[in-house]
Amino acid sequence: MRETTPQPVFLADYQPPPFLVDTVALTFRLHPGRTQVLSEIRFRPNPAATPGHDLRLDGEGLRLLSASIDGKSLMAQPDATGLTIPAADLPEDGFLWQAEVEIAPEGNTALEGLYMSGGMYCTQCEAEGFRKITYYPDRPDVMARFRVRIESDLPVLLSNGNPVDSGPGWAEWDDPHPKPAYLFALVGGDLVATTDSFTTMDGRNVTLNIWVRHGDEGKTAYAMDALKRSMAWDEQVYGRAYDLDIFNIVAVDDFNMGAMENKGLNIFNSRYVLATPETATDADFASIERIIAHEYFHNWTGNRITCRDWFQLSLKEGLTVFRDQQFMGDMRSHAVKRIEDVLTLRARQFREDAGPLAHPVRPESYVEINNFYTATVYEKGAELIRMLRLLVGEDRYRAALDLYFIRHDGQACTIEDWISVFEEAGGRDLSQFKRWYGQAGTPRIDVTEDWQDGRYTLTLRQHTAPTPGQPLKEPLLIPVALGLMGTDGREILPTQVLELDSPTLRVTFDDLPERPVASVLRGFSAPVILHHKLQSDERALLLAHDTDPFNRFEAGRSLARENLHAMVLQQTTAPDQNFIDALRVLLRDDTLDPAFRALVLRLPEQDDLAASLHEAGHTPDPDMIYDMRRAAQTAIARALEPDLARIAQQMETPGPYDPAARDAGRRALRVQAVTILAHADGGTAAAALFQSAYNMTEQMGAWAALLAIGAGEQEGAEFYRHWAQDRLVLDKWFMAQILHASPDHAVPLTDELSRHARFDWKNPNRFRAVIGALGANPAGFHRSNGTGYQLVADWLLRLDGVNPQAAARNSAVFETWRRLDTNRQSLIRAELQRIAGNPGLSRDMAEMVARMLG
Ligand code: 0A1
Ligand code: ZN
């Protein structure tokens, strides 16, 4: 709870730690209300810091029982955030700190530090949770060797590193790799493991365990398979092998984020581990594969090489996201993966960059670091690495990474260290590129064309609008991949990469036989908003023939967006015939990957339309967007009914269920076809699919299609009866109803479901499935009477009292408020002010609402 106004931390104020830690020995005597933590920490003065500092240790919510230095007991007086030992009391050459503290994991609802979930002990220490376990210099640039003893009657006791020994009621672990405290982990519980093994390229035999609650052991096979593929991939592609004898993964039900890369002991939100064909959708399987890989890849990019301070968070997160994207592309389809990644980037990161929460990939200040685990740090950070690779080429990218691993292994690094290896291995100056890390906002590129006497000229202009705290923007170095297509659909010029490094760039092409159609920003070569006016027949040409699969998709998407904009602005009730014709051609092209067809067939989401209308200078009206999107679906459904029905038949997968890309793509197209078809056939095909489905993908997809046309009540009841005992499937039951509720029904339904006996609001997954789902239903949430805003604000305040981090994350539903009409703006402002004025507000939430109110 807030007692004084929290002070921001600034990147510019970084100072090296005055003391380093060589070894840490911890003993845990686990008890729900009174866990004792004994620590023995060997400190020595940091030669890189000025001498004579006091020793400052972080510590929050700890009951200090005793403390000593070199065996001499101390009367330390902790304050609210830690304790200080005066320099005069510290031996000059180093010393042993010993302390005993008591903590209460059962009362820890914030899920940070040591807490309990379903009778099991677990930890979450990133970013600053270790200070809730014991007194320590809780900062990533202090790296130490940890040895841990756990005492408890629970059968499974785990920590980082390799097991040393164990007996009845105790276990000891030793981690030979120095690590920051945020990578510490401990688990104690009555768990069951799926066990396998992996032999590394340097011959190390590694035991792999996935630990789950009894009863869940049949749901771990896919996660284990993904883990082994991740380990092999990192060896093949990056030359990185695993470095311990054991790798443990534990699934917990109460977890604020997706998962955590603790050294040798990854802790996962159970939704990213547990899956069977009957309980998990293809999207769930893909998330499991990606997140298992992501956490595993952190072993090198995050753990062996970590961050100097939390401003450098993207050093590990942007890079690890980029690596998991590469892995998923290799496992599945690069084309489809790229499209999906760009859709996520636009939906989450462009949205963040366009509003009051915009911040650079490397922020310059923060109040609460947990508020900066954002799409910008993660997804935009990954885009910066993708651009670097494009700018230096694949071979030099690999050379730069080799250099990074050799030079910085065991260190806590900065973005400067990262850029330097690219400058050296890439052989070029990247000082202008580095601006991407410091400048917030999504650049806009305007493309204009000129065609005269066989000479074709393209002009590119870049502009970045001001963002909070950054009124002036400098030109960035933007790689723009470009190709030219002839009107007969053949490629005239294969892809080349232009470097737009000033406000304007002009390129000319001579001796062309005809005016070409330019395919700009192929592969989405930079995270920018592209404005390139084309005629709809030119877009149709790119949709049909572009050699770049991303731009093929993009041409279809632009056509869809332009049609929907026209419908919203002119209030016409149907899209153009040529758009529908283009969709028909695509639907009938059986040479195309079904997953690709499913993506093109999907209309831009309501939030995408609101953002693009706003970008074009309009005030988006959520109700109108909802109505017009539905009208477009109906027009498409009527026009393409026979084709959609044929696809729904043709894309049947015979089973047994295979989560791999081929069948997943067929299911995606089938569900998409049935979803659109529901707008013409009243849901007949969807209801039939619901009944015949042998997997969760089709069952959920069919039910969602029914919900979206106001049907599906009976199916919902059936779904509940069947799945009420499966907590992850129950999340889907809550979420789907709210997500697809009609605009006037969404708020009352959310209110009703928030009173449901199974709405366990302290569980972050369940909270997101109910309150979060309302925020993801734009026309429902933005009801013009403000009831959606009130309901969400009430719940955020309630959650803030028990789990500030989760509450603050969920508060970002309000981030788009300034693009709305004045009525909605004043309703939201009032709610944000109501939250801000709450006396016991957490630091997390206080920072979020202050930034949103600007
Ligand atoms: N490093 C993890 C994400 C993570 C961050 C913070 C957490 O708790 C505050 C938990 C997990 C990852 O990138 O997967
Ligand atoms: Zn990560």
Image (cartoon, helix red, strand yellow):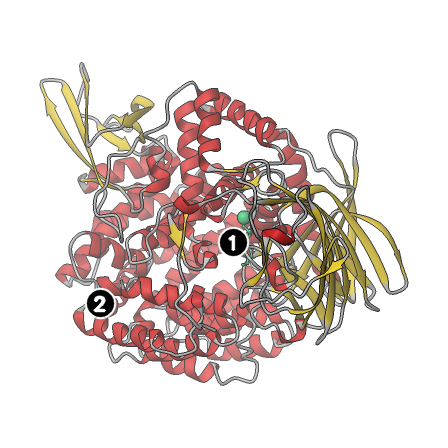
| Marks 1 and 2 close (CB-CB < 8 Å) | no
Q: CA distance from mark 1 to mark 2?
A: 31 Å
Return the mark for residue 624.
Answer: 2
Label 2 Cα neighbours within 10 Å, binned few <14 / some 14-19 / many ≥20 = some
The quadrant in which residue 170 appears is bottom right
Please state the quadrant of the image where ligand 1 appears.
bottom right
Q: Which residue is at the front of the view, 354 or 702?
A: 354
* Residue 655 visible: no
Q: Secondary structure at mark 2?
A: helix
Report the residue at 18% width, 15% height from top.
510
Please identify the residue farthest to the top as the structure is shown: 511
Q: Residue at x 37, y 51 (%)?
A: 349
Depicted 281 relative to depicted 139: above or below: below
Location of mark 1 (residue)? 667
Evaluate whether residue 849 shows in this view.
yes
Sequence-wise, which precedes: disc 1 or disc 2? 2
